[in-house]
Image (cartoon, grey):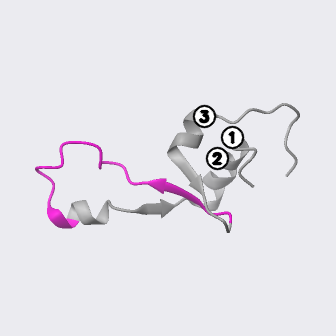
């Protein structure tokens, strides 16, 4: 996919998503920012790490990150 001329990176998207070396788009889990005291330890463990975006969503995110491919 060609990048539009003078297309800028959407900085809000760049802060929320990461593109791996193989091109997968990764996101963090929701619900891990605050109010963790009442969430169970298993739930907190499951919220660790990152999750891969589905291909349809990843295509939209990659349009906002023109320099990440």
Q: Is there a contact, CB below 8 Å, between mark 2 and mark 1?
A: yes
Discs 3/2, front: 3
Q: Residue at x 84, y 31 (%)?
A: 6
In the rendered image of this protein, does residue 23 appear above or below residue 1? below
Element type at mark 3: helix
Is 19 left or right of 68, judged from the image as shown?
Answer: left
Q: Main secondary structure of the magenta part?
A: loop
Q: How dense is the environment of label 1, judged by Cα within 10 Å: few (below 14), some, or many (20 and up)?
A: some
Element type at mark 1: helix
Q: Is residue 20 magenta?
A: no
Q: Which residue is mark 3?
A: 11
Discs 3/1, front: 3
Q: Is there a contact, CB below 8 Å, between mark 3 and mark 1?
A: no
Q: How dense is the environment of label 2, judged by Cα within 10 Å: few (below 14), some, or many (20 and up)?
A: many
Q: Is residue 31 magenta?
A: yes
In the rendered image of this protein, does residue 69 appear above or below residue 33? below
């Amino acid at each position: 996919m060609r990048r539009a001329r003078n297309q800028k990176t959407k900085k809000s998207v760049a802060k929320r998503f990461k593109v791996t070396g193989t091109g997968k788009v990764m996101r963090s889990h929701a619900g891990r920012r605050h109010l963790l005291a009442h969430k169970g330890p298993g739930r907190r463990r499951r919220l660790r790490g990152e999750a891969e975006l589905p291909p349809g969503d990843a295509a939209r995110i990659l349009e906002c990150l023109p320099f990440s491919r």
